[in-house]
Each structure stands twice: as structure tokens, then as C-alpha cells.
């Protein structure tokens, strides 16, 4: 079963797609904890986003074997796979953060500029804010570079 774990991240969650899938797991109404044990009296009702539901339905229709595989997984394995995907996402975010901070710290002029930007931020939050600004700047630069590449003619100039 271990070799299937890598294949469990649905294509609709792929960050390379032009859309971002956001699924809410928050209940519409907070559970009523008056039952002593904290169990809700009524079942939890989750929000339904028709756009997200349509994307899920399309993915299921395009990938029936994958959908069958998901449906036949034992519940514990499915739950652990969902947690594994969350852990992988957090690891990916941490690697990006460390890469951004490393790039900033290697350039003293850049480091001074970022320190100036966050001079009024509480000390314990500075590194996080610097990483966030750095990620935003990195995305902006990549977007501009991508636009310039799209505007260039594909032929080689003489």
C-alpha cells in the first residue's frame, strides 16, 4: 500500500493549475456542546461551494480508477493520507521560507533593505514577515519575467 501514497494527491490540488482549490471544513454553525460529552446534538453541516464541487466532480469523471481506489481505501489509511498531504505541504512551505531567508541573508544590501522594511515589527515576528515579503517579491519578479517572455517573438533575431 505504501507505493500508492505518492499518487494520492489529486490533480485538482496541483499548484501548477491556473486555479486554487479551497475547501472549507468549517461547519456552518458551531456544534452545540451542551450534551455533556461535547458531542453535537445535530450532525455537522459543511459549506458547499458549487465551483469546488464541479471541479471535484470533473476530476472524478476524468479519473474513475483513481476514484475507485480512494473509495476502497480503509478509512484509517485515507485519514492518514490526508494528514500526510498536509505534512508535505507544510514541509514545502518551510523549504520555500528557508530558501527565501537564505537568499536574503546572503546579500548584505538586500538584508539591510528588508531589515529597514520591518523595523517597526515586533522582534519575534520579523523573520516571518521578512520571509513573507520575500516570497511575495519572488512571485512578482517571476510573474513579470513570465510576461516579458510571452511578449518576445519566438524567432531568433539577427
Image (tube, rainbow, N blue to C red):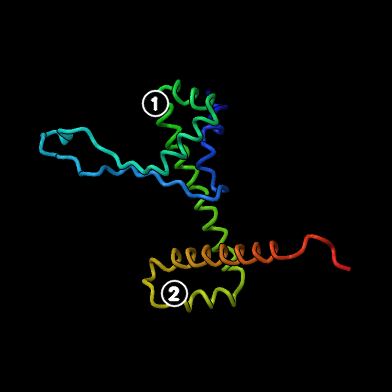
18 or 126, nearer to the observer: 18
Label annotation for residue 53:
none
Position of residue 47 in the picture relative to residue 118 (left or right)? left
Which residue is at a point 54% across and 63% down the rendered structure image?
101
How many numbered dots are placed on residues in this image?
A: 2
Quarter that holds the C terminus: bottom right
Q: CA distance from mark 1 to mark 2?
A: 44 Å
Instruction: In the rendered view, tell whether residue 133 sits above or below residue 34.
Output: below
Which residue is at a point 54% across and 48% down the rendered structure image?
15
Instruction: In the rendered view, tell whether residue 108 sits above or below residue 56.
Output: below
Mark earlier in primary sequence (1, 2): 1
- How busy is the neighbourhood of tag 2: few (under 14 within 10 Å), some, or many (20 plus)? some
Question: Horizontal and vertical percent for residue 35?
Answer: 11, 34
Label annotation for residue 118:
2
Which residue is at a point 19% across and 40% down the rendered structure image?
31
Question: Horizontal and vertical percent for residue 141?
Answer: 60, 66
Instruction: In the rendered view, tell whether residue 33 sits above or below residue 116.
Output: above
Q: Secondary structure at mark 1?
A: helix
Question: Horizontal and vertical percent for residue 155?
Answer: 82, 61
Q: Secondary structure at mark 2?
A: loop
Determine which residue is flagged by label 1.
Answer: 76
Instruction: In the rendered view, tell whether residue 52 sits above or below residue 129.
Output: above
Amino acid at each position: 500500500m505504501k507505493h500508492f501514497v505518492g499518487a494520492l494527491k489529486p490533480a485538482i490540488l496541483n499548484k501548477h493549475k491556473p486555479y486554487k482549490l479551497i475547501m472549507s471544513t468549517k461547519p456552518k454553525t458551531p456544534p452545540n456542546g451542551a450534551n455533556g460529552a461535547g458531542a453535537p446534538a445535530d450532525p455537522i453541516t459543511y459549506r458547499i461551494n458549487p465551483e469546488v464541487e464541479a471541479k471535484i466532480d470533473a476530476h472524478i469523471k476524468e479519473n474513475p480508477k483513481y476514484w475507485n481506489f480512494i473509495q476502497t481505501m480503509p478509512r484509517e489509511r485515507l485519514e492518514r493520507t490526508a494528514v500526510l498531504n498536509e505534512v508535505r505541504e507544510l514541509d514545502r512551505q518551510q523549504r520555500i521560507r528557508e530558501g527565501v531567508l537564505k537568499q536574503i541573508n546572503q546579500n548584505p544590501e538586500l538584508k539591510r533593505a528588508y531589515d529597514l522594511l520591518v523595523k517597526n515589527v515586533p522582534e519575534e515576528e520579523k523573520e516571518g514577515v521578512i520571509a513573507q515579503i520575500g516570497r511575495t517579491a519572488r512571485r512578482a519578479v517571476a510573474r513579470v519575467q513570465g510576461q516579458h517572455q510571452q511578449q518576445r517573438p519566438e524567432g531568433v533575431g539577427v
